[in-house]
Image (cartoon, rainbow, N blue to C red):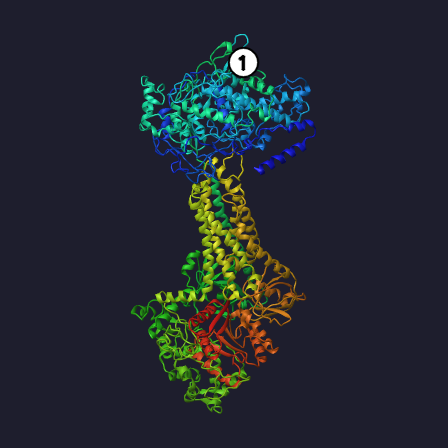
Amino acid sequence: MKGVGLVLFIISVWTLASGQDSGHHEEYSKEYIPYDGWYNNRAHPEWGAADGPLTRRAPSHYKDGVYAPSGDDRPNPRKISLETMAGNTGHGSFQKRTALLVFFGQQVVEEILDAQRSGCPPEYFNIKIPKDDPLYDPEGTGTKEIPLLRSRYDQGTTGYSPNNPRQQLNEITPWIDGGLTYGVTKAWADALRLLKSECPSRKDNQDYIYHNETTNATNAVDCRGELASIDDMGHLPARNDIGLPLANPPPPRDYKLKESKRFFRLGNPRGNENPFLLTFGILWFRHHNYLAMKIRERNAGWSDERVYNEARLQNIAVHQKVIMYDWLPQFLGDCESRYNFGNIKCKNYDATRSTNQPLPTYDGYKSAIHPGITHVFQSAAMRFGHTLVPPGVWRRSRVDKATKTCTFFNTTLKTAGGRHELVEQPALRTCNTYWNSIEAIQESDIHPLLMGMASQICEREDNIITPDLRGSVFGFLDFIRRDLMAINIQRGRDHGLPDYNTAREAYGLNKVERFEDINPVLMNMSVPEGAALLQRLRQVHGDDISKLDVWTGGLMETQRQGPGELFREIIRDQFERIRDGDRFWYENSKNGLFTEDEIKEIEETDIKKVILRTNPTMDDDDIQENPFIFTNDSTKKEFCQQPYQLNETDMEECTPPKSFDYFSGSEVSYALTFAFFGLFVIGTVLVMLALGRRYDNTRVRLKKQAAKSTRKGKRTEDFLYASTERISAKETRDIQVKFGPGKLLKIQSPRGQSLRTIDTGKFSKFLICTSYNNGRKTLFIRPDGDVHDLVLDFADEEERSGFMMRFTNFLEKFHISYENSDVSYNQLMEQAVTKSNRDERLKKFFKTALSTVLKVETGKVEETMTNDLARKYIHFEITKREFAEYFNMKPDNLFVNQMFTTADIDNSGSISFREFLDIMIIFTKGKAEDKARLMYNMYDLDGSGEMEISEFRMMLKSMMEMVNQSVDPDQLDNLVVTMLRTQGFEHKNSLTFEDFKCLMADYKDELDNASLENKDLKTFQEVRPKSPEKKSAAAKSDPKVPRSRAYTRIQRARQTVKQYNKEPSSGAPIRPRAQRQTQLQVRVFERKVEEEGTLRHRMRAISNYIQNYRYHIFWLTMYLLVVAGIFAERVYFYSVEREFAGLRRIAGYGVSTTRGAASAMMFTYSSLLVTMCRNTITLLRETFLHRYIPFDSAVTMHRIIAWLALVFTVMHIIGHSVNIYSISTQPIFDLNCLFRDYWRQSHELPKFHYWCWQTITGITGVILTLVIITMYTFALDYARRKVFIWFWWTHQFGYVLVYFFMCLHGSGFLVQRPFFYYFFLGPAILFIFDKLYSVSRNKLEISVINAELLPSQVTHLEFKRPSNFDYKAGQWVRIACLAQSPNEYHPFTLTSAPSEDTLKLHIRAVGPWTINIRNLYNRENLVNNPYPKVYVDGPFGEGHQDWSKYKVAVLVGGGIGVTPFASILKELVQMKQIGTKMECSKVYFLWVTRDQKQYEWLTDIIREVEGVDNNNLLDTHIFITQIFQKFDLRTTMLYVCERHFHKTAGKSLFTGLSAITHFGRPDFQSFFISMCQEHVQCDKFGVFSCGPPPMTTSVEKSCSYLNTFEGPSFIHHYENF
């Protein structure tokens, strides 16, 4: 209370300080009536406040005692209405009450009570319509319902327990304080005011309502204190052109929504409901302005504010007096003459005031009295007036002075709603005027209605209700006509009203035991109507009076005098409390509002005076003395009696009930919207494909230009044609076709590598088949008798035509016949025998042959040489080229020629199936001597029986050529000499077979196990302990460790290099640098291919995968659990905690799903930012966290999160497509409740296009969908490969748009308050700081000081090192080339050492950007221009930079993946040279490459490192994989050569390095086992690999496997490219 007092004190001081003269001080010395009812009662400020709870005199009877509606065992409300309240109308009131009294009563209700607004969220409590209902269900469906929403209630403090059940709210004050005229808030009241002191338009204007009553022109212009009117003329309130939220249901007659601008501004939002209620609203509006005019005349110096407040005060006082002392007595009727069942003492109070005064004499304000409206008053008693409502209302003219008669008006075209057939109907039909109230007012002002209502007798006081209320009251569009009587009953149950007798007891009345005792007069058994009514009442209630509702029972009590004893007592009690509990009541002399004279003046004012004051055109004869009663007594000026008592059959009919589909009008927009999304997806994909096609066309154009430039200046027979060869239906390759020399047709790669040669002279005929559709750019050439066709695709028809002309001319030149054929593209592809078709046949040929020889399992089913297969392939022959390709050799290789000649016994030029079997048996089943004899005979070229030394040298050279290995001739000669010297053959000119056997004696085992590698025969070696027990490191290296399936069935897999650093028995090796003895073993092998589909295979794959990726799985699982938790929390919240919320009830579980998906989207899209914080990740991986968190998998995690985000996005979109459909089908009033933040005009019915395209949530959702579609489309591999720049830009701007519109998306408050920022702020701040750090350094232009174009499409860039650029070996940077796109960055690993003054990169040209880089830095293209500058962003960390943290580190590089190790190798030696202390004492570098010439630049680096590594810190091993398997006969010969050369020269025969060269793939597991024995004191090995996924996976598997045993751990860090 102290706070309240302080507020009042401050208000008083402020108001006093605002005065400018004594008059103003006087103005604020009075406490005016508050608008919202607060502080009327100083002890209880909230009593009587607007939006306060209704009160209870009768106990609540909720079904569950808390909130569930009562009366579930009571009869159907509609059935009660039909059976007990229907009947013939047209019977006048017994007491001669007028229609003016009835509708004045409605405005009284609107003054003190408004509990009609539904609760939010909506709770439907529909009324079931009985089957075959004559009005609502004539079809007899039995499925229809009258929609009814439960009333709004105090959700904050009530409805939680039986001790505090649900309490509905009264949205206005219960006081008679002018709410109907001024509203219940200051803001609303100000919106009604004129707020100006002068109205010049009134001067000498006859349209001004009071132009005859002003004393002079100045007074006419003066308009201080008035309420706003149309054109300031004072007739009608101003239009609602400012958008006051007036009630605006659809008029049932017109069945459509209309603009609320047509209404007048009134204090009560429902004041425009019907013309009769509106008439009283205008009446009190005019009375205020009349009082303001009189106050101005008496107080010329008063301000606008004071005049307004005084006029408002007096207007309220007059209203109080008229209601309480004029209207209420007439409404309740006489007490003494009524039947009271002996329950109450009935007497007339305050006889001095009238003989029928129901209230006691006012004896002052009583602060202890609560004025609150009771539930039974709101839901039942005050609805007694419904029985008095007539089906229509008369309008009439003024009384003729001479004849004392008047004219009653019929309907006009305007009041008939433009319906000509209803013109000249008597009176205004009540049911058709709902929400069309302004028509009659505009046509004839309010005085015809006032006079008509005063002359019209209302309906009889009985149980019968006019159909205009009982079935045709207004509703919503979906149910435009409703039964107000059924609603009265249902509303009482909604509010928890008890049964009829319980209510009587609560008001001190005796219980009624029998139905007939309710009203013996109305239900008189001797009268047929009374007996029938009693029978129907009993029947509908099952003869159980305890099931009788308060409204039904109270209505049945109705007597001739008025409401029965229950309703009369409820109404009397309510108004007495309103009067006595009101501190601002006009009779309360202590409130200081009025003087005694002013009170007396108020007492003398009645409703007639108010009517005459506000209607200057009327005089005293135009209306009777008491407009509430009409007895046809001329002495009371009751001159104009109604023509007849109106009956609904006398007037126009009520428009019939209609239903409405709220989705109507949304069908097109709904379909078009989602069609638009679908087309946008297709369009985006097509744009991407078009851009990719443009990229391809650009390449083709460049190829054509290159081909033309190549052909220019060359001989005709050497012309080149660029084309694309179709190897299969899906596989193609770019080629060039060269004519010549001679009759040769050469097919070569764009780089000039020969792919196929067709000797046209060997073929008698060619078939040229072309396509006549699909661009007319495809053809195939079939040499008659060749193995497969040449299928070519050209850029366009012109290119194809040019080629055909050149080809046919070429054939004709050599007199070679040909035949043309033109077919469809599909037919062409069906007829063509592509290389893929031929390869498939060859594969089956070789597979069948090997299966026959070896009976090995090849696939899921063991194939054997069945008779069917034998017949199929017995006549199949292969060419020398196919024979060579099968063994991965060149057709012109000496070895191939000799072997093919050996196999081709019949000299047919091809090898048959049987001939192939014979040669294979020798190499698979033969002994070492057999194989040596075969080799010897093959290279005894002259067949002399002895092999010349030159032939021996040629044999070795051919072996090297077979694997694309080249050796310096001097080194090869030195090799031959040393091999001969070893056996003492250095002086021989030729070798006999015995001599050759001696040379091969040391390699008998290798020869014995040697075979020929082919595409189907794979050997394997798997070193793996069988026992699952833990073993020590020593045990790991023990050769006696049991091995599972260590040998194949033919036992070809064995160790080929044993302890390579140990001295061989034949002599000590020559070592250029000191090496200590080591037990390290390096093995090479071919990977074992297990049978797929077996349980063991699957379980092993799962186990290995989990072991290999345990940290990844852990963190991914944690992330998925968090995402699932976020999703589940929202789903649970909306499914359970908000189960009865409005949107949940409308959309069902769809809203739960979309909210869960929305929260998951917020989290996933926000998480993406974390994965892009490269600097932060680099920093964190320098900490101990990198041991537990796989920071190097940030990109992979980014992709996973992105796919999760997409899944939830799709879920969200699909969910909202259903939700918005559901929303679009809801009544407008429900939507006003659910979406209060979405403003729209009340006449606008929100359709789907409104929600989707006109709300902030909808339009941002559309934009987000389009952005995400674009981003994900251009994130596809196809886009990144062909239009990378589009991928880059869509992601750069896409993320900004996504986060911006996601913030806006939630700001619409569509479903819940936005909380995207909860997820977004943390990652966003981190990303911003991370990006700012990058921006601060990556905009420095750095000059490139050197560029080299190295073989293998590698570009070497060397550029200046910024002064503040510190990095570690193994880290990477992002660079952007200013000559390409300054904003397009690509990542590359640094190959320079941290100690170097420059930064170096080795970039392989594999994509558009890298290819352009190679072209940009080509010195030939630059001419005299400097190298383009670059931007550098970085460095960024990865696992390889941690190599120095391990005592022993193993570096494994494959392909271009060796780049990080180039920097590490340089740093390693540098650190040792300057004496830097580091934990690492030994580094093993394993370089896996296709051949030693693939990356020559790395060879130079290794050579440099070997030159300065005097401490034996680095051991390098090079594995050449483009070679035959380990025990292939040719590989065995390479090993022989390599070992001999290394013994003599101390370096590799092939690389020139001290590093050992191996042929095949490394066996990482055996290598790691050897390391355990070599470094017995080391408990942890660091393994770092970079290369293609198969290689890094192999390393990971080996590490994971060995980590399952006791002993040292292998910590693997890898990076794939």
SS at mark 1?
helix
Q: Nearer the viewer, residue 344 or 1261?
A: 344
Residue 1358, given in percent of the width and then of the height, sits at 62, 69
Q: Amino acid at mark 1?
A: Asp
Towards the viewer: 1346 or 1175: 1175
Which is more toward the observer, 112 or 1536? 112
Above or below, 1372 against 1219 in this view is below
Query: Circle 1: is it few (<14), some (14-19), or many (20+) Cα within 10 Å?
Result: many
Q: Is residue 1176 above or below residue 86?
A: below
Please, which residue is most extreme toward the left here?
867
| Nearest to the observer: residue 78 or residue 865 | 78
Whether residue 1378 can be seen here: no
Residue 1371 relative to residue 488: left or right: right
Image spot of residue 793 (x, y percent): 48, 60
Q: How many marks?
A: 1
Work out whether 540 lies above or below 998.
above
Identify the image quadrant of residue 88. top left
Q: Circle 1 is placed at which residue position?
A: 622
For the N terminus, the image quarter is top right
Q: Is residue 468 left or right of residue 1358?
A: left
In the picture as drawn, the residue positioned furthest to the right comes out as 21
Is residue 742 among the parts visible in the rendering? yes
Residue 1197: horizontal and vertical position, in percent?
50, 60
Find residue 1268 and report its horizontal and vertical position in percent.
Answer: 52, 51
Farthest top residue? 402
